[in-house]
Image: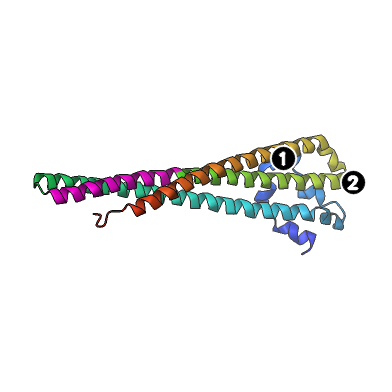
Amino acid sequence: MSGRSLHLLLPAVLLAAGCASNDKLVVSDLETARLPAGAVEGWQDEQLEVIQARDEVARAELGVSDAERELDVAKAEVEVADAQIDQAQKQLEAAQRARDDQAAQRAEEQLEFFREKKRVAESHVEAQQRQVELAKTRQELAETRQQLAQLRLNQTKFQALQEADDPAARNYSAQEFDQAVAEQQQRLAQLRRQVESQQGQYTRARDEWQQQLQQLESNAPSTPAG
Protein backbone atom coordinates (compact mmCIF):
# COMPACT_ATOMS: atom_id res chain seq x y z
CA MET A 1 0.00 0.00 0.00
CA SER A 2 1.43 3.40 -0.93
CA GLY A 3 1.77 6.21 1.57
CA ARG A 4 -0.81 8.30 -0.29
CA SER A 5 -3.30 5.39 -0.37
CA LEU A 6 -2.84 4.84 3.34
CA HIS A 7 -3.38 8.53 3.95
CA LEU A 8 -6.78 8.32 2.24
CA LEU A 9 -7.84 5.54 4.61
CA LEU A 10 -7.78 7.84 7.62
CA PRO A 11 -11.28 9.10 8.38
CA ALA A 12 -11.66 12.82 8.70
CA VAL A 13 -12.92 12.38 12.23
CA LEU A 14 -9.55 10.95 13.26
CA LEU A 15 -7.80 14.01 11.95
CA ALA A 16 -9.74 16.06 14.49
CA ALA A 17 -9.62 13.63 17.41
CA GLY A 18 -8.12 14.05 20.83
CA CYS A 19 -5.25 16.50 21.02
CA ALA A 20 -5.96 17.46 17.45
CA SER A 21 -8.77 19.67 18.79
CA ASN A 22 -6.01 22.29 19.31
CA ASP A 23 -5.55 23.97 15.92
CA LYS A 24 -1.91 24.66 16.74
CA LEU A 25 -1.33 20.92 16.89
CA VAL A 26 -3.11 20.05 13.63
CA VAL A 27 -1.17 20.18 10.38
CA SER A 28 -3.69 20.49 7.59
CA ASP A 29 -3.61 18.43 4.40
CA LEU A 30 -3.63 21.65 2.40
CA GLU A 31 -0.27 22.56 3.90
CA THR A 32 1.34 19.16 3.43
CA ALA A 33 0.00 18.98 -0.14
CA ARG A 34 2.69 21.45 -1.14
CA LEU A 35 5.44 19.05 -0.06
CA PRO A 36 7.25 16.77 -2.53
CA ALA A 37 5.31 13.68 -3.61
CA GLY A 38 7.52 11.34 -1.58
CA ALA A 39 7.21 13.31 1.66
CA VAL A 40 4.10 11.38 2.75
CA GLU A 41 6.26 8.27 3.08
CA GLY A 42 7.90 10.02 6.01
CA TRP A 43 4.81 9.63 8.18
CA GLN A 44 3.45 6.32 6.91
CA ASP A 45 4.35 4.57 10.18
CA GLU A 46 2.50 7.22 12.18
CA GLN A 47 -0.57 6.78 9.99
CA LEU A 48 -0.51 3.04 10.66
CA GLU A 49 -0.30 3.72 14.38
CA VAL A 50 -3.37 5.95 14.18
CA ILE A 51 -5.34 3.24 12.36
CA GLN A 52 -4.26 0.59 14.89
CA ALA A 53 -5.15 2.90 17.77
CA ARG A 54 -8.59 3.49 16.28
CA ASP A 55 -9.16 -0.27 16.13
CA GLU A 56 -8.03 -0.60 19.74
CA VAL A 57 -10.58 2.01 20.79
CA ALA A 58 -13.32 0.07 19.00
CA ARG A 59 -12.34 -3.12 20.83
CA ALA A 60 -12.28 -1.28 24.15
CA GLU A 61 -15.76 0.12 23.53
CA LEU A 62 -16.98 -3.41 22.84
CA GLY A 63 -15.36 -4.53 26.09
CA VAL A 64 -17.35 -1.92 28.01
CA SER A 65 -20.60 -3.07 26.37
CA ASP A 66 -19.85 -6.71 27.22
CA ALA A 67 -19.02 -5.87 30.84
CA GLU A 68 -22.19 -3.81 31.25
CA ARG A 69 -24.27 -6.63 29.76
CA GLU A 70 -22.74 -9.11 32.23
CA LEU A 71 -23.50 -6.68 35.06
CA ASP A 72 -27.16 -6.66 34.01
CA VAL A 73 -27.14 -10.47 34.16
CA ALA A 74 -25.73 -10.39 37.68
CA LYS A 75 -28.37 -7.87 38.79
CA ALA A 76 -31.06 -10.13 37.34
CA GLU A 77 -29.70 -12.99 39.47
CA VAL A 78 -30.34 -10.87 42.57
CA GLU A 79 -33.92 -10.25 41.46
CA VAL A 80 -34.48 -13.97 40.88
CA ALA A 81 -33.12 -14.77 44.33
CA ASP A 82 -35.42 -12.17 45.89
CA ALA A 83 -38.42 -13.81 44.24
CA GLN A 84 -37.30 -17.25 45.43
CA ILE A 85 -36.84 -15.96 48.97
CA ASP A 86 -40.36 -14.56 48.92
CA GLN A 87 -41.77 -17.86 47.63
CA ALA A 88 -39.87 -19.92 50.22
CA GLN A 89 -41.03 -17.60 53.01
CA LYS A 90 -44.65 -18.10 51.97
CA GLN A 91 -44.16 -21.88 51.86
CA LEU A 92 -42.68 -21.81 55.36
CA GLU A 93 -45.57 -19.80 56.73
CA ALA A 94 -48.07 -22.14 55.09
CA ALA A 95 -46.32 -25.20 56.56
CA GLN A 96 -46.27 -23.62 60.00
CA ARG A 97 -49.98 -22.85 59.82
CA ALA A 98 -50.64 -26.45 58.79
CA ARG A 99 -48.36 -27.67 61.63
CA ASP A 100 -46.48 -29.75 59.06
CA ASP A 101 -43.04 -30.03 60.67
CA GLN A 102 -41.40 -31.82 57.72
CA ALA A 103 -42.66 -29.29 55.20
CA ALA A 104 -41.61 -26.46 57.48
CA GLN A 105 -38.10 -27.91 57.79
CA ARG A 106 -37.80 -28.24 54.01
CA ALA A 107 -39.04 -24.68 53.56
CA GLU A 108 -36.54 -23.39 56.12
CA GLU A 109 -33.70 -25.15 54.31
CA GLN A 110 -34.82 -23.73 50.99
CA LEU A 111 -35.24 -20.26 52.49
CA GLU A 112 -31.68 -20.31 53.85
CA PHE A 113 -30.38 -21.60 50.52
CA PHE A 114 -32.07 -18.81 48.59
CA ARG A 115 -30.78 -16.21 51.04
CA GLU A 116 -27.29 -17.51 50.48
CA LYS A 117 -27.98 -17.51 46.75
CA LYS A 118 -28.82 -13.82 46.97
CA ARG A 119 -25.57 -13.11 48.83
CA VAL A 120 -23.65 -14.91 46.08
CA ALA A 121 -25.56 -12.96 43.41
CA GLU A 122 -24.70 -9.71 45.16
CA SER A 123 -21.06 -10.79 45.19
CA HIS A 124 -21.39 -11.39 41.45
CA VAL A 125 -22.76 -7.88 41.02
CA GLU A 126 -19.80 -6.44 42.89
CA ALA A 127 -17.35 -8.37 40.71
CA GLN A 128 -19.08 -7.20 37.55
CA GLN A 129 -19.09 -3.61 38.73
CA ARG A 130 -15.33 -3.90 39.11
CA GLN A 131 -15.13 -5.29 35.60
CA VAL A 132 -17.14 -2.39 34.19
CA GLU A 133 -14.82 0.09 35.92
CA LEU A 134 -11.82 -1.75 34.49
CA ALA A 135 -13.30 -1.84 30.99
CA LYS A 136 -14.03 1.90 31.06
CA THR A 137 -10.49 2.70 32.15
CA ARG A 138 -9.17 0.47 29.37
CA GLN A 139 -11.30 2.44 26.94
CA GLU A 140 -9.88 5.71 28.24
CA LEU A 141 -6.39 4.22 27.90
CA ALA A 142 -7.10 3.25 24.29
CA GLU A 143 -8.48 6.71 23.53
CA THR A 144 -5.38 8.32 25.02
CA ARG A 145 -3.18 6.10 22.86
CA GLN A 146 -5.18 7.17 19.84
CA GLN A 147 -4.76 10.84 20.76
CA LEU A 148 -1.03 10.35 21.22
CA ALA A 149 -0.72 8.57 17.87
CA GLN A 150 -2.61 11.39 16.15
CA LEU A 151 -0.44 13.95 17.87
CA ARG A 152 2.74 12.22 16.75
CA LEU A 153 1.42 12.09 13.20
CA ASN A 154 0.86 15.83 13.19
CA GLN A 155 4.26 16.40 14.78
CA THR A 156 5.93 14.40 12.01
CA LYS A 157 4.06 16.42 9.37
CA PHE A 158 5.21 19.61 11.05
CA GLN A 159 8.81 18.38 11.00
CA ALA A 160 8.44 17.61 7.29
CA LEU A 161 7.34 21.20 6.70
CA GLN A 162 10.35 22.41 8.64
CA GLU A 163 12.75 20.24 6.64
CA ALA A 164 11.24 21.55 3.41
CA ASP A 165 11.60 25.12 4.70
CA ASP A 166 7.89 25.56 3.98
CA PRO A 167 6.44 28.88 5.28
CA ALA A 168 3.53 26.93 6.87
CA ALA A 169 5.95 25.55 9.45
CA ARG A 170 5.87 28.96 11.13
CA ASN A 171 2.24 28.32 12.06
CA TYR A 172 3.34 25.70 14.58
CA SER A 173 5.67 25.39 17.53
CA ALA A 174 8.05 22.51 18.16
CA GLN A 175 7.89 23.31 21.86
CA GLU A 176 4.10 23.01 21.91
CA PHE A 177 4.26 19.66 20.15
CA ASP A 178 6.91 18.39 22.58
CA GLN A 179 4.90 19.55 25.58
CA ALA A 180 1.67 17.99 24.29
CA VAL A 181 3.41 14.67 23.60
CA ALA A 182 4.94 14.67 27.09
CA GLU A 183 1.55 15.36 28.69
CA GLN A 184 -0.10 12.56 26.75
CA GLN A 185 2.69 10.15 27.68
CA GLN A 186 2.27 11.08 31.34
CA ARG A 187 -1.48 10.52 31.14
CA LEU A 188 -0.85 7.20 29.43
CA ALA A 189 1.42 6.06 32.26
CA GLN A 190 -1.20 7.06 34.84
CA LEU A 191 -3.92 5.11 33.08
CA ARG A 192 -1.69 2.04 32.79
CA ARG A 193 -1.14 2.08 36.56
CA GLN A 194 -4.89 2.53 37.08
CA VAL A 195 -5.65 -0.43 34.81
CA GLU A 196 -3.19 -2.58 36.71
CA SER A 197 -4.76 -1.64 40.04
CA GLN A 198 -8.32 -2.17 38.83
CA GLN A 199 -7.35 -5.50 37.25
CA GLY A 200 -6.22 -6.71 40.66
CA GLN A 201 -9.43 -5.51 42.32
CA TYR A 202 -11.58 -7.21 39.70
CA THR A 203 -9.61 -10.47 39.88
CA ARG A 204 -10.00 -10.63 43.66
CA ALA A 205 -13.73 -9.87 43.50
CA ARG A 206 -14.27 -12.43 40.73
CA ASP A 207 -12.34 -15.14 42.59
CA GLU A 208 -14.31 -14.48 45.76
CA TRP A 209 -17.60 -14.72 43.90
CA GLN A 210 -16.58 -17.95 42.17
CA GLN A 211 -15.57 -19.50 45.50
CA GLN A 212 -18.92 -18.53 47.01
CA LEU A 213 -20.72 -19.95 43.98
CA GLN A 214 -18.93 -23.29 44.30
CA GLN A 215 -19.81 -23.48 47.98
CA LEU A 216 -23.43 -22.59 47.23
CA GLU A 217 -23.69 -25.35 44.63
CA SER A 218 -22.25 -27.91 47.04
CA ASN A 219 -24.77 -26.88 49.73
CA ALA A 220 -27.81 -26.91 47.47
CA PRO A 221 -30.82 -28.73 49.00
CA SER A 222 -31.91 -31.90 47.28
CA THR A 223 -35.30 -30.52 46.22
CA PRO A 224 -35.17 -26.71 46.16
CA ALA A 225 -38.35 -24.86 45.34
CA GLY A 226 -38.68 -22.32 42.52
Mark carried by residue 185: 1
Q: Verify whether residue 173 appears in magenta.
A: no
Q: Which residue appears at 67% of the width and 41% of the height?
A: 188
Task: Classify the position of the N terminus by image quarter.
Answer: bottom right
- Residue 110 can be seen in this image: yes
Tell me where residue 185 sits by quadrant. top right
Residue 122 covered by magenta stretch = yes
162 horizontally vs 131: left or right: right
Q: Nearer the viewer, residue 63 or 35?
A: 63
Q: At 20% from the left edge and 45% from the top edge, which residue is drawn? A: 89
**For the point 76% across and 48% down, which residue is it?**
153
In the rendered structure, which segment of residues is drawn in magenta?
101-126
Q: Earlier in the sequence, mark 1 or mark 2?
A: 2
Q: Looking at the image, which residue is at 54% across and 53% down?
A: 62
Q: Identify the residue under disc 2.
A: 163
Residue type, mark 2 in image: Glu
The kind of secondary structure element at disc 2 is helix
Residue 204 screen position, x and y as percent: 51, 44
Near mark 1 (Cα within 10 A), the count class, few <14, some 14-19 or many ≥20, is some
Residue 16, quarter of picture: top right
